[in-house]
Image: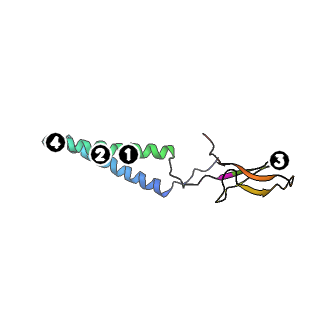
Amino acid sequence: MSQPKPRSGSSIVITIVAAVMAVVGLYTIGLALNGNLDPTIQILYFTIAVLAFTFVVLSFTRMRRGVRIGAFTPPKVLSVVKCGQCSFKQIKNFALGDFVFKTLGKCTQCTTGDLSINGIYTEGSPKK
């Protein structure tokens, strides 16, 4: 049986804030239901209660889904190098200054053809 993962510090703080907001929502509903207040003040209290409960619901659904904002990782850019004479093909990391049809020199396989960049692309992230 696997051990449950410990909660991160941010999820504990969000849980505490959500609990405080739930208490604030309940308190403002109690104030709004007090019959001897001005109707505009009652509407204000109901609005505060709705906002508080909306925050609670959204924060718990976000935590449940595990939505986290991760660090940005730049896509990996690759260049396709081909020989004009033989079938030699190589994929290399993109270097600054690379462009399509740029000649890189003689082919290492047939020694007669020229190597040139035939394509540049990024490695796509796997689709879910």
Mark 1 vs mark 3, CA separation in Å: 66 Å
Precedes in sequence: disc 1 or disc 3: 1
Q: Which range is magenta?
A: 74-78
Q: Which residue bears the numbered disc 3?
A: 85
Mark 4 vs mark 3, CA separation in Å: 83 Å
| Quadrant hosting residue 42 | top left
Q: Are marks 1 and 2 in contact (CB under 8 Å)?
A: yes
Q: Which callout, 2 or 4, points to the residue nearer the camera? A: 4
Q: Amino acid at mark 2?
A: Gly
Q: Is residue 53 magenta?
A: no
Precedes in sequence: disc 2 or disc 4: 2
Label drawn at residue 56 = 1
**Residue at x 26% of width, y 45% of height:** 48
Q: Which residue bears the numbered disc 4?
A: 40
Precedes in sequence: disc 4 or disc 3: 4
Label drawn at residue 25 = 2
Mark 1 vs mark 4, CA separation in Å: 25 Å
Secondary structure beneath label 1: helix
Q: Amino acid at mark 3?
A: Gln
Q: Residues within 10 Å of mark 4 (few under 14, many from 20)?
A: few
Mark 2 vs mark 4, CA separation in Å: 17 Å
